[in-house]
Image (cartoon, coloured by chain):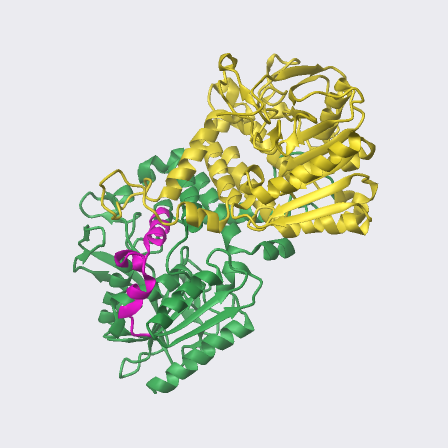
Chain colours: A green, B yellow
């Protein structure tokens, strides 16, 4: 696929200062995969951190070279980030980081534990959103970036942006929180729990040490991803994409086949997505990331009072939600907006009428992109 | 538990006239488990058929005797059916039938195939809602009931009521369709597909012939049921029932345990429901019933035109939906109502403001029960 950014390459950064985790465990050393786009200015004031969601990575924009082993792979937010894009890499220095514990080159459950010479597997420590943010802060330090012009993310990436505004309030100029939530609802946790149950109960999970058995809990991963995909699309979007259309070879009759094989288009779609995911994503990483999602709750130390929790933030906020998103519905964004307004923060809120459910944050919607573009234009003027 | 109906017992009915199925297959003979409450009047005009949903059975109301092997088990709609209840068994003769293909005594995949002397397993034919209705009609014949005063059902039971009104229009007086839909949406099918995938991919499923291996695909059934339970409750109901409350032994700290074991109350609830279900429900039956749900679509033979499809109905309709039901949302009931009104049918529609999601149809809501009570009072007067 084409990208206005062209060919990009990731870099692997090694960190050997121990990282104290929220669980109390310590990670003595770790690697992070990082990608950057654009040029850091002399004042180091034009840096933007883009945080990724569940299955994405440091590869935010651009394409990989043919010789990279991932020939032509387009960044997951290439429509948002690049020269002339809403987050314009002609003006900003944009950083993507594969989160600690993920499976795209950063240290995680698949990595070799130096203490044993074997993959960490189930022994890799559970992480929180705050742990990710702490690890990301060290990447900023490595680049000499004291303060990000903006930290931005969608979904789980939005939670990281919120966590940045609370954990390093003086290091965040603008905070862009898209299709996100200040904490998961019981229903959100329930979906995560079912997906995890599918993986944990897969006989090929082997308590998380499937690497040693030369297998992968594919069945569990597949079911987990299928569940996820239902929650990423709106009911209406699924109806217009698939409806009750049957999956038929050319010329086949429009009659039931009376089997549990693929009969409807939507079944074919889900199976394809499930199989694809099971082929590239690490099961332990899936468990770890969904648990970090469950745990994220800035209000927890404040007796559930989100307003009190957000009092330490200093950033200017842009919060955006999508009307058909039922995974993190607009009401969840409004909770965040209310708590910010209670604190008299500068906050802009947009509720966008897009049909694509939660996935809308990744898509190229004109009003949505105009909103983000306008905010970055303003930030660019302010730092010029 | 107490029931105003007291002790009831099921009867097993054998049918040896071959049943031609929608798939083209023929079932040479079969048994159906049946329960009745109240007394059939001399004119045989006071009979009501209650159709069940996915995991229920012929045991609609009353309790089983201590010696029955299911001591004290209360019928699944005991709050609705009994002396003085909305469907008053002092006035009506109520019939519950365990659907063909189910696993509570009616012939299904667990039954012995006379042709082989082994359980049918994967060789049991796939069924449709219309097949169930045809089998139910023979039960009516056996009782000498030419016309039901009413056919009623919730969820999948409501689809059976609709199918009755189309397949045997002259045999249905009132048709009560609660928390149902005239056909599944893509999202509904998607949830079924994920649940089936969990079962089909369980290594202990053995292509449907797990009986011979002395095992049950428990993991798959468990995940399937957990997914189901999320769709039965509303987001708000889950929030008020569980919220983000942690599952803690007395005196334990309100701190994360950093594990994939149960951490939140909602996880404990889902695991409990999943384990319970895997202990009593047959996996092949689960597949069969969800597929019958997917296939149900009266409009299919009419190019998707539901109005045309419903033209043959003669019954008077009561359609009820629940505002927080997102599995079969009110909009789905309204499709049915519109198509009935297009045909100038007598139809009453109620959209009930109850917080309990899809499950509301099984619960004792005062306005909901008053509505059903009033309808049956009117029917009772008409047949008196």
Q: Quadrant of the C terminus of chain B?
A: top right
Residue B345 visible in this rendered orientation of the protein: yes
Please report the bounds of the magenta region as a residue range: A287-315
Left or right of residue A234: residue A8:
left
Residue displayed at 53% across by 29% down: B283
Residue displayed at 76% across by 49% down: B339
Q: Main secondary structure of the magenta part?
A: helix
Position of residue B275 relative to residue B214, above or below, is below
Residue displayed at 58% across by 54% down: A235
Question: How many numbered callouts?
Answer: 0
Residue A126, how many percent across, how many down?
27, 49
Residue A299, how many percent across, how many down?
31, 59
Residue A315, how many percent across, how many down?
32, 74
* Magenta region includes residue A289: yes
Q: Residue B15 falls in which quadrant of the image?
A: top right
Position of residue A204 relative to residue A317, above or below, is above
Q: Residue B128 falls in which quadrant of the image?
A: top right
Using the image as rendered, state which of residue B97 and residue A40 is in the foreground.
B97
* Magenta region includes residue B282: no
């Amino acid at each position: 696929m084409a990208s206005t950014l062209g060919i990009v390459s990731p870099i692997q950064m090694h960190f050997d200062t121990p990282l104290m985790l929220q669980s109390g465990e310590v990670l003595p050393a770790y690697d992070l995969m990082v990608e950057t786009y654009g040029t850091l200015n002399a004042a180091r004031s034009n840096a933007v951190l883009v945080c990724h969601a569940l299955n994405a990575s440091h590869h935010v924009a651009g394409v990989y070279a043919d010789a990279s082993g991932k020939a032509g792979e387009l960044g997951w937010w290439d429509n948002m980030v690049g020269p002339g894009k809403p987050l314009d890499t002609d003006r900003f220095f944009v950083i993507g980081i594969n989160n600690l514990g993920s499976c795209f080159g950063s240290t995680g459950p698949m990595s070799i534990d130096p203490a044993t010479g074997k993959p960490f597997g189930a022994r890799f420590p559970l992480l929180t959103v705050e742990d990710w943010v702490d690890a990301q802060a060290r990447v900023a330090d490595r680049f000499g970036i004291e303060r990000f012009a903006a930290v931005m993310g969608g979904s789980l990436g939005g939670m990281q942006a919120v966590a940045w505004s609370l954990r390093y309030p003086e290091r965040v100029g603008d905070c862009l929180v898209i299709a996100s939530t200040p904490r998961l609802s019981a229903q959100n946790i329930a979906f995560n729990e079912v997906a995890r149950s599918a993986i944990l109960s897969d006989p090929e999970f082997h308590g998380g040490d499937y690497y040693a058995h030369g297998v992968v809990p594919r069945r569990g991963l597949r079911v987990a991803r299928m569940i996820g995909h239902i929650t990423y699309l709106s009911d209406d979007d699924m109806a217009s994409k698939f409806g009750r259309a049957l999956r038929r070879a050319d010329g086949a009759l429009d009659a039931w086949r009376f089997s549990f094989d693929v009969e409807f288009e939507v079944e074919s779609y889900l199976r394809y997505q499930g199989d694809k995911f099971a082929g590239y994503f690490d099961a332990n990483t899936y468990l770890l990331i969904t648990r970090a999602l469950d745990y994220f709750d800035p209000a927890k130390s404040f007796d559930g009072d989100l307003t009190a929790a957000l009092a330490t933030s200093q950033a200017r906020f842009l919060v955006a939600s999508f009307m058909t998103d039922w995974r993190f519905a607009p009401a969840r964004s409004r909770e965040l907006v209310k708590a910010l307004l209670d604190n008299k923060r500068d906050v802009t809120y947009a509720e966008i009428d897009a049909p694509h459910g939660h996935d809308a944050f990744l898509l190229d919607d004109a009003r949505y992109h105009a909103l983000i573009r306008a905010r970055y234009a303003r930030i660019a003027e302010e730092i010029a």
